[in-house]
Amino acid sequence: MPQPPGFEPKDDQSDRALRPKRLAEFTGQEAVTRNLSVAIAAARGRNEQLDHVLLSGPPGLGKTTLAHIMAAEMEAEIKETAGPLLEKPGDLAGILSALRPGSVLFIDEIHSLKRIIEEYLYSAMEDFRITIQLGDGATAQALTLNLAPFTLVGATTREGSLSAPFRSRFGIRERLDLYSSDELTRILSRSATLLDVEADYDGLQLIASRSRGTARYANNHLRRIRDLAQVRYANAITVPVAEEDRRRGPDRTRPAHPYLSGPEPSPGRPQDHRRHGRRRGPYHRGHLRALPDPVGLPDQDPAGATDQRQGLPPSRPSAAGGSG
């Protein structure tokens, strides 16, 4: 379809332009990169495929980036998929049968795999073969497919959700931790160079301090502030520019709380407590009938007891009716 005049289609590789391509370019996670570097060098020295790798940790720390780096370091192709996309064993069999020797299969959100898919991966990871059942009942037949040696790289934010037999089949298990402010500042300095925008150290440090230890949030902040700097500040990011971006509006990279999101109720209208997540008190309409019987009220004052059951303060006796 023709594009409007002056519109340039975005290159697909621009979204990954900020991601490092080699382990030497990866900032932070020193223990993880050191262990992966040793494993990759050993596998290349033996002319073997890399052992299966499980990467865990909070989102936005670089698990997908490390999977692509491992494939690049091993000079192998990489196939990507996600756990929720694999509905039945046939989906997995189609992907595995198309892999070339030494390929890397990256499964994001691997904790979302169904148990039957996990069981198919057992033999694929250990013996590089899978058995597919054809037909049902007495006419069922088992077909064994031999697979090319491959490396499975799984990424998960919930490692505890994986079953113990499945988790034990990963020879390399690494956990990514949150980045420090200095590490995020170095990441932002590299990203600013790739984005062709000038940025001083103090401005980048301020952005890093608001990124909650996550590289993805830091780069999202940088892209947004880059637009402001390009339009108003001669394509230069400084502390005042970063401060002005914070005053422009709420932090759109921070996910909204599920109970606090949404418009506030209009004045004079009843509030929908289920929508806004506010706790209702014990005297709202649905709880009037469940109030306990009054305690400590005199028996000779039934009117006061009735008021208490209705959630009202007890009525005071008039001066004329008092005991003299």
Image (cartoon, helix red, strand yellow):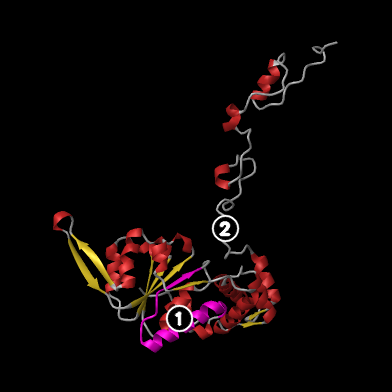
Judge whether 294 appears above or below 28 on screen: above
Residue nearest the observer in this picture, 179 or 312: 179
Q: Which of the 4 image quadrants contains residue 10? A: bottom left
Q: Which mark, by number, is residue 69?
A: 1
Which quadrant of the structure image shows residue 186? bottom right
> Of all residues shown, which one is farthest toward the top?
324
Q: Quadrant of the N terminus?
A: bottom left
Question: How far apart are labels 1 and 2 at the CA level?
Answer: 32 Å
Q: Amino acid at mark 2?
A: Ala
Q: What label does residue 212 carry, if any?
A: none
Quarter of the rendering containing residue 179 = bottom right
- Report if residue 48 lies within the magenta region: yes
Q: Percent from the top left, x then y, of residue 182? A: 65, 77
Check disc 1 and give the amino acid type.
Ile
Residue at left 57%, top 78%? 28
Q: Which region shows up in magenta?
A: 27-56
In front: mark 1 or mark 2?
1
At x 23%, y 65%, the residue is 132
Name the side, left or right, on which 269 lies relative to 70: right
Circle 1: element type: helix
In this rendering, position of residue 56 left or right of residue 316: left
User: Could you say which disc has been placed on residue 256 in the image?
Assistant: 2
Task: Label 2: state its secondary structure.
Answer: loop
Q: Is residue 138 left or right of residue 163?
A: left
Task: Name the outermost residue toward the right.
Answer: 324
Task: Examine the structure image and report whether residue 166 is included in the region drawn in magenta.
Answer: no
Q: Is residue 84 above or below residue 322?
A: below
